[in-house]
Amino acid sequence: MKNILEIKNLHKIYLGGIHAIKGIDLSVKEGEFLILLGLSGSGKSTFLRCLNRLIEPTSGEIIFSGQNVERAGGKSLRNIRRQIGMIFQQFNLIKNISALTNVLTGKLGYVSLIHSLGFSRIKNDVNLAEQNLKRVGLIDFKMKKIRNLSGGQQQRVAIARALMQNPRLILADEPVASLDPATADSVMRYLGELNKKDNITVICSLHFLSLARKYGSRVIALKDGEIVFDGSPREIDEKKFKDIYGQEAEEVEIR
Amino acid sequence: MKKKNNVKSIIQALIVDLLFWVYILGCLSYLSNNWFEFKVEYRYIALIALVLTLLFFLLGDSIGRKIFYKSKKTFKKWFKSIWGWLIVISLVITFVVGWNLVEVNPYKFFTKFKNAGGITSGIFNPSIVGYKLTENSFEELRENDVPLIILEKLEYIKNKSYTTKKVFLKDLEKKLNENELINYKSSILKYAQKNSNMLNKALNALAETIFLALLATIFAIPFAFILSFFAARNLMPKTFIGNSVYLVIRTIATIFRSIEAIVWAIIFSVWVGIGPFAGMLALMIHSIAALTKLYSEQIENIDPGPVEAIKATGASTLQTWVFAVVPQIISPYLAFTIYRWDINVRMATIVGFVGGGGIGLLLLQQQQLLRWHNVGLIIWLIAAVVWTMDMVSAKVRAKLAEM
Ligand SMILES: Nc1ncnc2c1ncn2[C@@H]1O[C@H](COP(=O)(O)OP(=O)(O)OP(=O)(O)O)[C@@H](O)[C@H]1O
Ligand SMILES: [Mg+2]
């Protein structure tokens, strides 16, 4: 299978001088479910945001399905971003508007401002948004304000918003870190389904090894901005685990 | 005596001392001019100040030395040092000069209260009768054998402003002799007053003020709305152009905001003429500046999460503003805008005093005519409106906060 993403010698040095990403090389195949592990501060969020340039990388090369990301600007950057869905730990939905409108914003990368100002009246988009809400099991909540939804429901709305982009890749930055274990698993199940059924490549940072084993097809571990492990989830034994998380760490099982 | 005091602190100390002496001598010369009509020329003041500065500096205990020299050696109680007494003296002089400038006069305060009797009784006894001449009163005057020449004049001023009528009546007073005065003036005044309705007039002026404030607010909204995006740190790119735009808008808004609406009203009353339009322009300018600041601070406080998420969908910058920023700020914007209207109604009254039209202008006119009962009526009306606006805007803002 061909590579959807190729990263060469990626560096990110923040303004204050913190070297958050130190020369990452990585190829991601189409259809992979890539889990990103690593301690707090190891650079997971920075790495994911460099991929769609929410954070400007300092140097290196990022190729997304043949297009050069780090050199793209204006229209071509928008064109790349709209093919990459993104899901956040804090959901990042607009709290005081309806679930349906939030999902519709996923379409913004495809339309002009004039068009988008009237988009609530565009039948096709609304139908698609409703379909996507149905997929995450929230069609009954479409008119509810985000503020009134639970954390798990909000994250599912965020998934529906990402689906609206018809993405080829989804970046998920600790999507379940603020959810209880059962809800976390159900949200991961939706991501797993998108990966299997729609063949959307997923890169997802996590803190739970059990979820990584259950859903991941490949695991990468970051430590101080460098890749310290790259392999199948089953390969992570106690020793590897301690390499990633430090000698004192114990694995906490969640089911 | 020579410690490690560098040249910079010596100069700083000398400048402070010099300014201090110039101030003290300036105050003293003002007082001598005021009390003994003895004027001291500026160059002598400067000269004496210079001498005193050097003198006290060399004595080693001046105020400038105290501030800029960090000597830990001898700690003297302030009342045992020269600088301490200099400060006490300067405070006393400042107080005396202030008392003189403000013309403080406790005697007047306690003995001349009866001067305010007119307005006090006006406030507690507001009239709803004004001084407008109507057709009816005109007819009655004719029947009362008021001379034709006066009637013609009355006809002429019938629809003129209050000030004109006032002048006319004053004139009448001068021209008529004792007898005529007794015969006609009272009846003219009586009829002139009886049939007109001050309440109507005041309510009209009040409506003018409220709508003036409303229009000023509404016209200010689009300007402030658009400017606020460019005056928000988190939306402007951290490039040279981004920073410049941010700085220029913020600076202009701050300057315009620090110029009081009353000053704008004076400018515009010359520009477009006295009246509500001048008042509206004045309040509008002030509101644009104030709202731009409030709005942009609101933008700086938004949750950056949705902005990031919308950007990630491939939305353009403008789309990000419309879909991630606007929904987050709309209800605080509304709250601020209503609050602003509330403020504008209050300011519109003041602005009316300097030519901005509305109830303020009416109040000024009635006050100059010494119609204390009308003044009383207007004061009550203003109080009622301000109170109502205050209540309503507080209620609406509380509702918006829940949204
Ligand atoms: N905007 C920023 N400016 C400066 N330094 C930053 C910034 N954001 C992150 N960093 C630093 O970069 C390093 C990597 O941070 P990052 O947020 O990518 O880690 P992470 O693995 O996502 O951590 P977590 O699990 O807590 O989310 C940290 O040392 C952090 O302090
Ligand atoms: Mg993170």
Image (cartoon, rainbow, N blue to C red):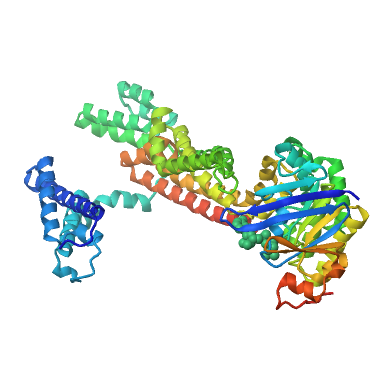
Q: Residue at x 16, y 56 (%)?
A: B93
Q: Quick one: B66 or A165, which is closer to the camera? A: B66
- Spot occupied by residue A155 in the image (x, y as percentages of width and height): 78, 60
Q: Residue furthest right?
A: A197
Return the residue nearer the eye: B80 or A147.
B80
- Decide if residue A118 is on the left or right side of residue B167: right
Query: Where A251 falls versus B152 (above or below)?
Result: below
Figure check: B320 above or below B60: above
In the image, residue A39 above or below residue B322: below
Query: Looking at the rendering, in which quadrant would you find the C terminus of chain A?
Result: bottom right
Instruction: Please state if A2 lies on the left or on the right of B248 as rendered.
Output: right
Please tell me in which quadrant of the rendered image residue A235 appears: bottom right
Q: Nearer the viewer, residue B47 or B36?
A: B47
Residue B322 percent across, percent down from the top left: 68, 43
Q: Position of residue B256 (x, y in %)?
A: 44, 40
In the image, what residue occupies the spot 87% across and 63% down? A189
Place residue B265 in its image quadrant: top left
Instruction: Give the answer, above or below, for where B319 lies relative to B77.
Output: above
Q: Residue at x 54, y 44 (%)?
A: B231
Residue B154 location (% of width, % of height):
35, 26
Q: Nearer the viewer, residue A12 or B80?
A: A12
Q: Please indicate, yes or no, whether residue A129 appears anywhere in the rendered image.
A: yes
> Ligand 1 quadrant?
bottom right
Residue at the spot x=63%, y=49% of the render? B330
Q: From the viewer's perspective, is B45 left or right of B321?
A: left
